[in-house]
Image (spheres, rainbow, N blue to C red):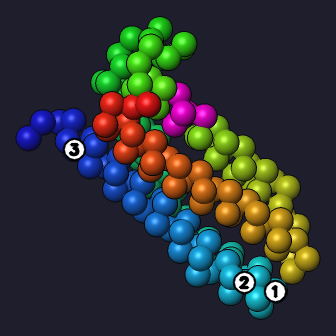
Amino acid sequence: MDFIWIILFLHVLGATIWTGGHLALSFVVLPRALKARDPKILTDFENGFEKIGMPALFAQVATGLWLALLMVPDLSDWMPPASGASHAILTKLALLLLTAGLALNAKFRVIPHLSPETLPVMAWHIRAVTLLSVLFVATGVFLENGGF
């Protein structure tokens, strides 16, 4: 078996865990927390999900960079994008920066003050990260088919 298939498998597995967890959070857990006005519902889910979600995200980033370098090994072709693949790689990097920005904002500005009153702000962060995770998957599909 080609080593690239192992890397790709780990990347897709990480994406499945990360995106699936955020879809469950957005469409199952978050509505319950908002209806009950209970931040503990969110924090309980997050505490459990972080044990598998963060390693999945780390695996995605590591394998994603590895795959990107295998697909477009010359970094000078990344900026400005010289191909559909380099466009998709830059899109994924932009999505990663947006995700990291939202995560840092939530960790340092929202979560320390999480209460029934601030749940809508946290909900916005959760929905945004969920949307970004779905866009990651869509971009990956485009990338596997030559980029855009």
The residue mark sitting in front, 2 or 3, is 2
Q: Position of residue 34 (x, y in %)?
A: 76, 82
Q: Is the residue marked by circle 3 packed among few (<14), some (14-19), or many (20+) residues within 10 Å?
A: few
Measure how far apart labels 3 and 1 are at the Cα level.
43 Å
Can you tell which quarter of the image residue 69 is in?
A: top left
Can you tell which quarter of the image residue 40 is in?
A: bottom right
Residue under circle 3?
6
Numbered disc 3: secondary structure: helix
Mark 3 and mark 1 lie on one chain; the one further toward the N terminus is 3
Residue under circle 1?
37
Task: Identify the image quadrant of the N terminus.
Answer: top left
Task: Tell me, yes or no, whether the highlighted magenta stretch contains residue 144.
Answer: no
The secondary structure that dominates the magenta segment is helix
Mark 2 and mark 3 lie on one chain; the one further toward the N terminus is 3
Disc assigned to residue 148: none
The answer to whether one can see residue 52 in this image is no
Measure how far apart labels 1 and 2 are at the Cα level.
6 Å
Which residue is rendered at x = 53% and y = 49% of the image?
135
Seen from the viewer's position, the closer of residues 81 and 50 is 81
Q: Amino acid at mark 3?
A: Ile
Can you tell which quarter of the image residue 111 is in?
A: bottom right
Numbered disc 1: secondary structure: loop
Q: Position of residue 97 (x, y in %)?
A: 64, 37
Q: Amino acid at mark 2?
A: Ala
Q: Which stretch is magenta?
A: 90-94
Numbered disc 2: secondary structure: helix
Residue under circle 2?
33
Q: Position of residue 140 (x, y in %)?
A: 40, 42
Which residue is rendered at x = 58% and y = 40% of the image?
96
